[in-house]
Image (cartoon, rainbow, N blue to C red):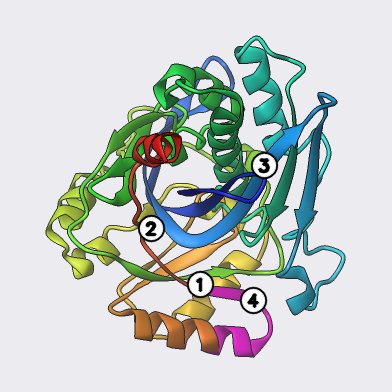
Amino acid sequence: MIVERSKDGFRVTVPCKVNLFLEVLGKRVDGYHSLDTVMMAVSLADELEISHRDDGRLLLSVELPERSCQNLDEEDLAWAIPADQSNLILRALERFRVFLGQPHYGANIRLIKHVPAMAGLGGGSADAAAALVLGTLLWTEHLKLDQFSTVASELGSDVNFFLESHRDGFWLARCTGRGEKIESLQCKKPLHLVVVHPPRGCGTKEVFDALRLEPSPRVLANPDKLIQALEQGNIKTIGETLTNRLEQAAEGTTDWIDRSRRQINRYDHHGQCLSGSGSARFCLCTTREQAEKIASEIRLQGEMRAYCVQSWQSPSIEEQIIRIRNG
């Protein structure tokens, strides 16, 4: 994230994520699935702003600049972003002010949405994490992020990643449990990718319901080779070890998964993979110029969204909060 002061309050630019590795270990007694996943933040980002309200209301406005640039049909839900209490931003701020013991704190929140929904890119979780950071700046003076990690994990499995995964400038982590247990990882150099999102999304519940895990014992994929390749900056091996257990289940929910795979395979790249539960896919490129060329050509086909992105780099959120509070 990038955290700044704004004219009336504070502003956050928050990246989305891709899953370089995702294994499903089994179903838990609470109904969730145990995961082992490597997630990396990338430069496709939303923007949030917050300012005080005196009447105790939380009021969210949503702007969709990408929507006007695309020909959408009624089944394309990429920009069906609610501004009511179903939005994770408002749920995050509601829980956070209760956590603070100040349920009557109010705020105006403005969301400028660039990350498509139903894509497996964690846009909703990223926005919830950003809302918690904004609430910290607006409503507290000394609270640290680790003091409300439980609030973050209750909002969604990916929220903690966007708060805790920083290491040496990169936002990259191995996440276990439901995804809320974070182990930050090293990355030797920036990675360049193309993220492709078709006009049909995937519902997370629908994909997990379609998942068929082999009876135990079964062979589980292991991310160790990928993690070593990231540490060494070995692009070829990173591409070869991209893994997502949910791929086949997601394919069963929409034929756009296979169509986007075939589209990407028309181009030279180091490997491609589904992100999260889909429907977005990404491929790994050698340079930014190569990624820009592929994304541009896919967009010209007119069927799918395509974004040239790179691994996200910024100071830790704690560093940025300290700078703002001292500034």
Per the rendering, the mark at residue 159 is: none
Compare residues 164 and 122 and report the one nearer the observer.
164
* Magenta stretch in the rendered image: 297-307
Q: In the rendered view of the protein, which quadrant contains the C terminus?
A: top left
Q: Nearer the viewer, mark 1 or mark 4?
A: 4
The residue to which callout 1 is attached is 261
The residue to which callout 2 is attached is 312
Per the rendering, the mark at residue 50 is: 3
Name the secondary structure under disc 4.
loop
Residue 95 appearing in the image: yes
Q: Nearer the viewer, mark 1 or mark 3?
A: 3
First in sequence: mark 3 or mark 4?
3
The residue to which callout 4 is attached is 304
Disc 1 residue type?
Arg
Q: Nearer the viewer, mark 4 or mark 2?
A: 2
Tell me the residue at 68%/36% (across/down): 88
First in sequence: mark 4 or mark 2?
4
